[in-house]
Amino acid sequence: MPVLARWIEAAGIPTVVVTMMPAMAEERRAPRVVGVEFPFGHAFGMPGDRGMQRRTLELALRVLAGASGFGTRVDLDVEWPVPVREAYRAWQPKEPSPIVRKILEGRKSS
Amino acid sequence: MLVDSFRFLPRTFRPFYEGRGPHPGEDEPVWAPFDKRLAQARIALLTSAGIYLKASQPSFDLEREQTNPEWGDPTWRAIPASVTAGEIGVAHLHVNDEDVKADPEIALPVRLLGELAGEGVIGGAVERHISVMGYQESSLREWRTATAPEVVAHLRDQVADGLILAPA
């Protein structure tokens, strides 16, 4: 996604990436980054929590419009309101993804 | 406050993400200045949650990914700003999709963006936002040669002044 943002930015359209892995977005050289400490699949916050979603979207808009230069990163200071162990389990798919299954099978057979 | 990028990631996955550096050939800065005031700008959203319209669009191809785990469907879908939760399907094998099905705003906040336009915070929202499926083969070849140019053309057609991208 940071690389896709770069290509769109290079075509002249300003971008911001809202991500739970801002360190990776920086490594991948995204022009503008908003970090959120939310579980995967929840870039804008909790389902049904309009206040949290709005805080996230408004920060994204501020960084999109107001960042002064390449590599700007601003993190959202909002804590996920679910205990980390529970949230960690909840975001993961019920079945391992094909690539995870392949890696796990490779480990078993090696 | 600095976000911990690994807070919700299984420890065994961390080496797949950490210290990879830039994508090959993508280390130079790129920058398009945001020239307008937000209150006059049209904003677009892009999600990689694998959202599609159940009634009129094909799902992202998960069957092929099942047989070829290194591959992910590189195509994209246009999602109208008026979309409702009941109209969307979600095709993404790497996250639990229950929450995004219940409230798609957590991935693609089209309604909220429309409210901000109504309040004058932004000038407007595009009519058709963008959805991709974020798990891609590592070369990103199809994304670079086909998807990115098509998305750029779509954004120009929608007269977008800026894009907010959010991975799943």
Image: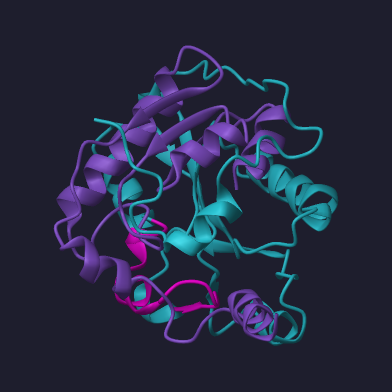
Which stretch is magenta?
A: B88-108
Would you identify the image quadrant in which residue B132 lies? bottom right
Report the residue at 54% width, 38% height from top. A25
Q: In terms of image quadrants, where is residue A65?
A: top left
Tell me which residue sits at (40%, 74%) in the image.
Answer: A92
Q: What is the quadrant of residue B136 in the picture? A: bottom right
Q: Position of residue A13 (x, y in %)?
A: 63, 30
What residue is rendered at 60% in x and 48% in y? A1
In the picture, one chain is purple; tell me its letter: A
Q: In front: B62, or B89?
A: B62
Residue B20 vertical placement versus B161 (above, below)? below
- B74 to the left or right of B86: right
The colouring scheme, among rainbow, by chain, secondary structure or one colour, is by chain
B94 in magenta? yes
Q: Is residue B124 above or below residue B140?
A: above
Q: Nearer the viewer, residue A1 or B165?
A: A1
Membership of B92 in magenta stretch:
yes
x then y, percent, for residue B85: 36, 75
Display colour for chain B: cyan
Please, is residue A86 above or below residue A8 in the view?
A: below
